Image: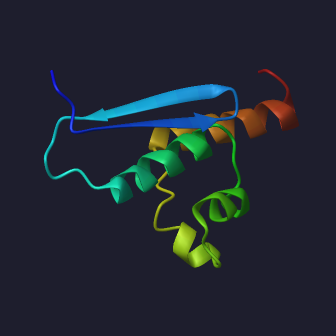
């Protein structure tokens, strides 16, 4: 398959390759994906704002859509730290 675009993103020690065969691909579309990957890797909203170049947290919140499973993992991690591995 021929790809219209290929973008390589390095986040910490991880390397992500995005390939798009769509003709309506926009580089801006990767911002949502990158923000999700950064958040799931443990980045804070402040760090995400810095990486994305946003001046306010209000703007970065538009890109920070956490999945229910990721939110549940965060709560489980907090509970484990507070109450032990019950």
- Where is 53 relative to 9, above or below? below
User: Residue at left 46%, top 68%?
Assistant: 62
User: Residue at left 65%, top 78%?
Assistant: 55
- Percent across and percent down for residue 9 are 52, 38
- Quadrant of the image containing the C terminus: top right
Residue 58 figure quarter: bottom right
Q: How is the image coloured?
A: rainbow
- Quadrant of the image containing the N terminus: top left
- Percent across and percent down for residue 19 are 31, 32
Residue 54 figure quarter: bottom right
Q: Horizontal placement of 39 versus 64: left or right? A: right
Q: Horizontal placement of 34 versus 85: left or right? A: left
- Percent across and percent down for residue 82 are 86, 38
Q: Horizontal placement of 4 versus 31: left or right? A: left
Q: Horizontal placement of 46 versus 28: left or right? A: right
Which residue is at the front of the view, 19 or 50? 19
Which residue is at the front of the view, 75 or 18? 18
User: Residue at left 59%, top 39%?
Assistant: 40
User: Residue at left 40%, top 50%?
Assistant: 30
- Where is 13 relative to 6, above or below? above
- Where is 72 relative to 54, above or below? above
Which residue is at the front of the view, 65 or 52? 52
- Where is 61 relative to 82, above or below? below
- Percent across and percent down for residue 47 are 71, 57
Count of all numbered marks drawn on residues in the image: 0
């Amino acid at each position: 398959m021929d790809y219209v675009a290929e973008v390589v993103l390095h986040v910490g020690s991880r390397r992500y390759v995005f390939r798009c065969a769509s003709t309506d691909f926009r580089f801006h579309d990767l911002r949502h994906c990158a923000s999700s990957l950064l958040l799931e890797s443990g980045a804070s909203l402040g760090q995400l704002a810095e990486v994305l170049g946003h001046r306010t947290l209000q703007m970065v919140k538009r890109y920070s859509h956490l999945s229910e499973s990721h939110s549940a993992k965060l709560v489980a991690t907090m509970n484990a730290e507070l109450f032990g591995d019950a």
